[in-house]
Amino acid sequence: MDITAPRFTDETAAREHLESLQWPDGPFCPHCGSLNATRLGGTHHRAGLVQCNDCRQQYTVTVGTVFERSKVALNKWLLVNHLMCSSKKGMSAHQIARMIGVSYKTAWFMCHRIREAMKPSSPEPLGTSPDAVVEADETYVGGKARNRATRKPAAKKAVVALVERGGEVRSFHVANVNAKTLRPLIVTNVSRAAHLMTDESPVYTRVGREFNGHSAVNHSASEYVTTGGFKHSNTVENFFSIFKRGVIGTYHHLSEAHLGRYTAEFDFRYNTRKLNDTERADIALKGITGKRLTYRRTDKLAA
């Protein structure tokens, strides 16, 4: 989709596009759930205003979404959403601020709201299909000691990813990588009928017994893939390679307080990799409902 499309340059076109995604059957009241509504026109009402004929509340398509009460034009919201969905390794808030003419603080907050919309509302467990294989692995995000002025050890942050072969990924920031931390995460997000594939780390040994099967690749013995190509963890490592390129080449530094939203962003793009940019952006716009995110809340997390 050309970024000069009307919905990226005109606020009315942007609102109409968002309404077509959020209200396919007509205006839906976020207060009482009624479909019985009247559009309010004329010069005395703001554009897109609707009044519910049952509860008499007034609303627009952005009420109850991450766009609610924003002073940024709606067409700029849709443009930023499209840029984030179409950039394989992400786009920095500084770059977005320069492109759409807002402050860095505004662009940073817009990006976090869109990442919130990218999170799945009620995800199904991975590995529910017959003969499914789910790979689990961990990586660490953070600078190297030799690149720091004090040469002190860098504060690394752990990210664990679960990837179903041919399916979706789910990644998480965890405080510590140990069996006690990883077990509830794995059993909650992976079907017990799946075959769990990991490396030789002992943190996966006990939880692996709870699944239909468990195989471990011995990387310390230079084993990366077995004959026949079944036993390997290349799928999850490929995901990590994209994630790391985004961290190193685009964001450079990720706050631990917000790391979970960055992982959700990379998860979303990976899980919609078979779609084109327009379809991916529309799916993200459908996820904005019921996910209010205020600046005060994000600021407290960063404090």
Image (tube, grey):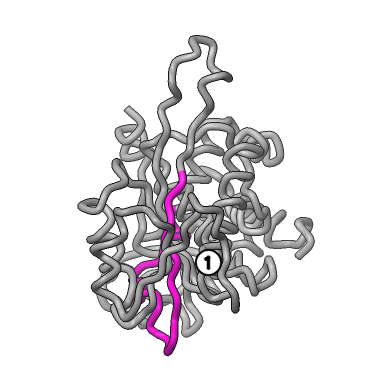
Which residue ends up furthest to the bottom in the rendered image? 130
Please check the rendered image and state whether residue 123 is part of the magenta-colored stretch, yes or no. yes
Question: Can you tell which quarter of the image residue 229 is in?
Answer: bottom right
Q: Quadrant of the N terminus?
A: bottom right
Question: Residue 278 location, x and y as percent?
Answer: 67, 68
Task: Tell me the residue at 41%/27% (across/down).
Answer: 155
Left or right placement of residue 35 versus residue 221 in this view:
left
Which one is in front, 145 or 98?
145
Q: Is residue 138 above or below residue 19?
A: above
Task: Tell me the residue at 25%/71% (across/down).
Answer: 209
Per the rendered image, the range of residues in magenta is: 116-139
Which one is in front, 264 or 189?
189
Which residue ends up furthest to the front in the rendered image? 221
Question: Can you tell which quarter of the image residue 212 is in?
Answer: bottom left
Pointer 1: what residue? 232
Which one is in front, 103 or 150?
150
Which one is in front, 26 or 4?
4
Q: Amino acid at mark 1?
A: His
Question: Residue 76 location, x and y as percent?
Answer: 62, 50
Question: Residue 53 location, x and y as percent?
Answer: 32, 77
Q: Is residue 82 visible?
A: yes
